[in-house]
Amino acid sequence: MTNIYLIRHAEAEGNLYRRIHGWYDSLITPRGWKQIAALSRRFKDVHIDAVYSSDLIRTQMTASAIFIPHDLPLHTMPELREVNMGEWEDRTWSEIERSMPEQLIYFNSDPEKWQIYGGEAFSHLQNRMKSAVLEIAGRHAGQSVAAASHGSAIRALIAAVQNVPSREISSIPHCDNTGVTLLHVEGEDIDVAYYGDISHLPEEVSTLKRQTWWKNGDSSDANGLLFRKAATKEDSDFYLKCRMEQWRETFPEADMPEVFLRRFEENREQTYIAFHGDRPMGIIELDAVKSRADRDRGYIEFYYVLPEYRRGGLSPQLIGQAISDFRRDKKEYVEISVPYMAKDSCGFFEHFGFRPCGMSEDGGREMIRMELDISYNWLRRHEVMYV
């Protein structure tokens, strides 16, 4: 008999920013690295003969909790990937909930009926996951293996193994990030010893404990945001309101420089209004001029969330929108400048992985420059041994 510890990857950008990442290659978040540390402690004294992961970087990063301390090479298998989300890739869940509600209900409640352009059939996902598990077991008969995969892929496998019909997929709960499922494999038989165990995970670093979408029967996301490029007079008025409010919060005695409004006209095509439901709640403005001039670096010119929407888990989604745009443009870093007089705001950005990278001046203000690495350089830095 082969023991396979099937592990959902740690919290990644899609989980945090509420974006749809199937085959889209996203990185682990700072909270995700805390989950990986907890996973590593769990497996410290567990005998493991081999480590596998899907070929996406978020599962490889997660698998490092085991293959690095156990001094083992990493086997990557595309067959362990998440479901291919087709035309939905890297769009927000809220956008899909608004534009294709019936298909979203099918995806969450009866995935055999889910059909979108480029999307992977549920039966295909189940077959490739089952084949991957049986192949791993065949290579490692009588051994113990750890394999990092993805939430929907693992859930689809469990449904196949336990003969759960597609229309009853909701009976299989969503697994938290780094949840561990133990499979006993003997020949063609797969037995589920336990599913989605998170006994290693402190509650304060759990992802699902901080979110509510998984509690809804149709997995609708009441805390998701919609993004629309600023185009209307109402958008311009909202932008001006946000600029003025931010300026007064930091420099109540000074007039706001006109240069910021001129930049808005330059950046309008890369300025997004964030909506919670039908209400605008924030702005993310990307600096088109500086970003075009720098091959590797994208710049956020303005970031603002209305006070009543802060501390509710919505704010990070604006960062996710910026990352989406900059990664499409092949950027490796995202930079934002924070007024030195509002340096307490640095803690917010540091929480999501930004680090101070220098000082500058803008509009007569002393600024703290902060950067976020959005590249895939982790693999090169860690010299992963592949098989």
Image: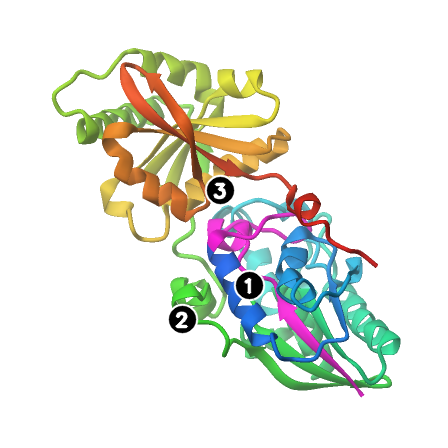
Q: Nearer the viewer, residue 73 or 310?
A: 73
Q: Position of residue 115 (x, y in %)?
A: 69, 56
- Point 86% across, 85% down: residue: 187
SS of the residue at dot 3? helix
Q: Nearer the viewer, residue 173 or 287?
A: 287
Spatial separation of the CA atoms under disc 1 and disc 2: 14 Å
Q: Position of residue 126 (x, y in %)?
A: 75, 69
**Where 217 falls versus 303 (above or below)?**
below
Q: Earlier in the sequence, mark 3 or mark 1?
A: 1
Q: Amino acid at mark 1?
A: Ile
* Badge 2: residue crowd in 10 Å (few <14, some 14–19, many ≥20): few
* Badge 1: residue crowd in 10 Å (few <14, some 14–19, many ≥20): many
Spatial separation of the CA atoms under disc 2 and disc 3: 24 Å
Q: Earlier in the sequence, mark 2 or mark 3?
A: 2
Disc 3 designates what residue? 320
Q: Amino acid at mark 2?
A: Glu
Residue 13 on the magenta segment:
yes
Spatial separation of the CA atoms under disc 3 and disc 1: 21 Å
- Point 55% across, 54% down: residue: 12
Residue 133 on the magenta segment:
no
What range of the chain is rendered magenta? Answer: 1-30
**Where 305 falls versus 132 (above or below)?**
above
Disc 2 designates what residue? 203
Q: Nearer the viewer, residue 19 or 49?
A: 49
Q: Amino acid at mark 3?
A: Gly
- Mark 3 or 1: in front is 1
Q: Quadrant of residue 172?
A: bottom right
Q: Is residue 71 left or right of residue 264?
A: right
Disc 1 designates what residue? 36
Placement of the N terminus among the 4 image quadrants: bottom right
